[in-house]
Image (cartoon, rainbow, N blue to C red):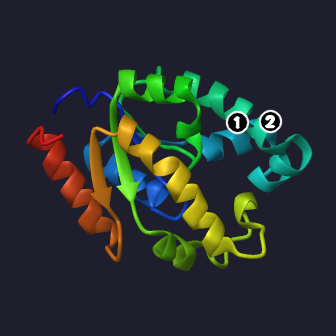
Amino acid sequence: MMRAQNIFIVGPMGAGKSTVGRQLAETLSYTFKDSDQEIQRRTGVDIPTIFEFEGETGFRARERQVIEELVSEERIVLATGGGVILSAENRQDLAARGVVIYLHCSPEQQYARTARDRNRPLLDTEDPLAKLRELMEEREPLYRQVADMVVSTEKRGTSSVVKEISRRLESEEI
């Protein structure tokens, strides 16, 4: 397996990063980590609370610190937050320390998957679908820039996505 000491999963909210990451880690016998869960564990509060008290800037500073630490671990599958790629330092760390997989899905699919989730502070808006489209337009070039592999999760089950990733990692089809 090429350079896959670590596997880092990037993509928009609702793309399946945590779900796919957890199953992929199990398949590969790697340790699963989730940067948002790690931030919540360290602060003792949920992401919306961090946004409420520290704003997105405060959250991104916490995220930067967690990413910097987690990328130095070995044999992990790391599911990152949707905005992790906004930081050039995060993109550099992820690209240098493992294989980066971009899980892609449309804003409409994201909306269908996140519509009832109240833990999405960026979607606390009049028109969440418009916000998802705006975020995708801004972030997609950065996801693609850092990605070694792009995998669609559009209308696909977790096991199908994990099988594709595993096959491509084994065949070094990155």
Q: Position of residue 84 (x, y in %)?
A: 57, 40
Residue under numbered circle 2: 58
Residue 164 appears at what percent x and percent y?
20, 58
Taking the spot 58% from the left edge, 31% from the top edge, the residue there is 87
Q: Is residue 10 left or right of residue 132?
A: left
Question: Is label 1 in contact with label 2 (beta carbons under 8 Å)?
Answer: yes
What residue type is disc 1 on? Arg
| Picture quarter with the N terminus | top left
Q: As drawn, is 16 to the left or to the right of 173?
A: right
Query: Disc 1 on helix, strand or loop?
Result: helix
Image height check: is 174 above or below 87? below
Q: From the image, tell me which residue sits under label 1.
A: 60
State the residue at coordinates (33%, 51%): 24
| Distance from Cα at disc 1 to Cα at disc 2 | 5 Å
Point out residue 93 in the picture as x, y percentages from the top left corner.
47, 23
Left or right of 2 on screen, residue 151: right
